[in-house]
Amino acid sequence: MPLTAPITANTPSTAFERLLTIMDDLRLNCPWDKKQTLESLRHLTIEEVYELSDSILSADMPEIKKELGDIMLHLVFYARIASETNDFNITDVLNSICDKLINRHPHIYSDTEVNDENDVKRNWEQIKLKEGNKSVLGGVPASLPALVKASRIQEKARGVGFDWEEKSQVWAKVEEEMQEFKNEFNAEDESTIDHERAESEFGDLLFSLINYARFININPEDALEKTNRKFIKRFQYLENKAKENGKQLHDMSLAEMDIFWDEAKKL
C-alpha cells in the first residue's frame, strides 16, 4: 500500500519537516535508499556540489534552486544515517553549526569590536586556534584541488597577518618568478631542462599569480573556469564551421582554423 506523501509546505520550518519525513520514508522503504552509507554517498555529494558550481557560473537561478535542494537532501541523508548508530542526528548538526557561528562572531553576539571584514577573518582564525586547531592551515582539506587549496592557504595566512602589505609587492613577486622561470626553462633544447625543477618553479609562479588575484579580488578558480568555457565555445564554433565547409580539423591548416577562431572571438 503506497504511503501518503506529505503536502507542500509554506514556511521554512514546515518545508524542512517535510524533507525529514520524506527522508525517513525513503530510508525505511526504498531499496536504494536503505542500502546507502556515508561512504557510498560521498562521491555523489561531490558531484552535486560541482553541478551547483556549474549552475552558479551559468547564472541559472532555477538550476541553482534545484541543485541546492539536491545538496540539502544529501546533508539530511548523512544525518539520518548517523542517527541510526546514535552518533548524531539532524538536530545535533544544526545546533552545532549555530553554536559555531555564535562563537565565531563575537562582534555580533558579544562585545568584541571590529572595523572591517579583515578583523572578522582574523578573529575567526584566532578563535579556531583556541578551539583546538593545531595550525591555522589545519582547516584546509588535503584533498582540495590545488588551485582552490592555494587560494585557501593564502587566505588563512592572511587571517593571522602573514601577508604582503601592498599589491605592488605581490606583482613584483609574480614578475620575479616569471623571469626566473623564463631564464632557466625557456630553452630551445628540451633535453637540457630539469623537468622536476621546472615543475617546482612553475608551481611557484602559479602560486604567486593566485596570490595577486586575491589582492585584486579575483577568484582564480572562477576566472580559469570562465576561460575554459570560453575556449570550449569557440572551439566548438570552429568544429561546426569546419563541418559546414565539408572539412575535418586535422585536414585544415592552422591558418584556416584561425579564420574561424577569429570569427568565434567576435561572437
Image: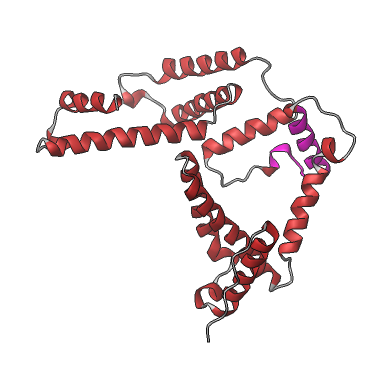
Residue 265 in magenta stretch: no
- Could you tell me residue 216's position as x and y percent? 58, 21
Q: Is residue 87 left or right of residue 3?
A: right
What residue lies at 83% left-to-right and 38% top-to-bottom? Answer: 108
Instruction: Please name whichever residue, 118 or 9, is drawn nearer the observer in this view of the structure.
Output: 9
* Quadrant position of residue 118: top right
Principal secondary structure, stretch drawn in magenta: helix
Instruction: Please name whichever residue, 205 or 245, is drawn nearer the observer in this view of the structure.
Output: 245
Residue at the far right: name it.
Answer: 111
- Could you tell me residue 222's position as x and y percent? 49, 34
- Could you tell me residue 120's position as x and y percent? 76, 32
Instruction: Please name whichever residue, 86 or 190, is drawn nearer the observer in this view of the structure.
Output: 86
What residue lies at 52% left-to-right and 36% top-to-bottom? Answer: 147
The C terminus: image quadrant? top left
Instruction: Please name whichever residue, 196 or 102, is drawn nearer the observer in this view of the structure.
Output: 102
What residue lies at 70% left-to-right and 60% top-to-bottom? Answer: 13
Residue 126 in magenta stretch: yes
Specify the segment rendered in magenta: 119-138
Relative to residue 160, is residue 22 depicted above or below?
below
